[in-house]
Amino acid sequence: MKTFSFCMNLYCLSPNGFNKLNKTAMLVYKIAAEESMQKAAFETKSINNSLEMKEVRISIDGSWQKRGHNSLNGVVTAVCSDKCIDAEIFTKHCDGCKMWRSKKGTPEYQCWLVDHQCESNHKGSLGSMESVGAVAMFKRSLQKNKLIYKEYLGDGDTSLFNDVIEADPYKEYGIMPVKLECVGHVQKRLGTRLRNLVKAQKGTKKPISGRGKLTENCINSMQNFYGLAIRSNVGNLYSMKKAVYAILFHFTNFPDSYTRHQFCPRGKYSWCKYWALNQKNYKPKSTKPLWIKDLILPIIINLQSDELLSKCLHGNTQNANEVQVIREGKKKKKNS
């Protein structure tokens, strides 16, 4: 600020003056944010011409000021119909407490402590901010927005949802929230498990990595097709399971092409070139041998289970909540 003011030949604000302007701007931002969230909640209720209590699907995710586990500030957002309808801001830092820490126990400290309003509102770990914020937003959803968060769209972390279930925010209505899986996070599980399998087989007599086997490109393709199998069969569990199973056969060297592609989606818009192209013009590529298929089969069976895929029938992700990605993107543009 001093350097900028000097270069522009302007009077530089004092620290107190700068802080006062910041507090005034913060109040304006807060009012604008609350109005925006109230409007988004009203639009959500108006979709079905219902201005009374309504059950909706919510997506909750946390973001922190800095990547890693050393950030002091965080925010938890609740998104419904691609719009933010609630947020909870946390901080573990207080300027006053930091300034007076060295004088703790003195008479001056006790006098200051009487009128002090601590800015820190979270004493737990950084990771617990997300759970605390989610529980708070579930509890006030009826009072604030007249909404019941019936379905919660989240990642693989179950601790947050367990805390919500324990809080039982809709006990008087006999409603228990249901957890759905983020397709983006589920999609990555296949890639993670295949890479772990490659590492586990690396020191054995039959390694599965290398040319003509389970390469990194092959793993990425299988992961992408797994996500596509879920998104292309929204609401249809049987077709979704069949499409997931097709991935295993598609990437295995069977004696004939029909056996290899029998479960693949058909038609000219299929991701499988055997069915998308004229079969006479199809040139099969060499992929995994049959014995590798048997090693991958347990992973595919687990990731096509009814319990998992039934939570993915919505076909949605948490992308709308990824405030961290948006903020980091703006930071990169600013620094470039």
Image (spheres, helix red, strand yellow):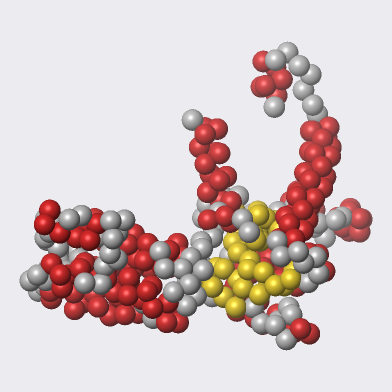
- For the residue pair 217 and 236, the one nearer the viewer reads as 236
Locate residue 167: give its quadrant: bottom right
Describe residue 208's horizontal placement relative to residue 244 as left or right: left
Location of residue 74 in the rendering, given as x and y in whole percent from the top left corner: 64, 55
Does the image show residue 104?
A: yes
Q: Is residue 263 above or below residue 278?
A: below
Q: Is residue 195 visible?
A: no
Percent coordinates x, y for residue 242 in the rendering: 32, 75
Residue beneath the point at 83% across and 32% down: 17
In the displayed structure, 79 sits above or below 307; it is above
Image point (78%, 72%), residue name? 53
Residue at horizontal 60 percent and vertical 64 percent from the top: 59
Quarter containing the N terminus: top right
Q: Position of residue 2 (x, y in %)?
A: 70, 24
Query: Which residue is farthest top?
Result: 9
Which one is nearer the viewer's eye here, 89 or 106? Answer: 89
Residue at image position (28%, 60%) is 267
Task: Please state if 284 lies on the left or on the right of 331 as rendered.
Answer: left
Is residue 316 found left or right of 275 in the rendered image? right
State whether residue 176 is above or below residue 319.
below
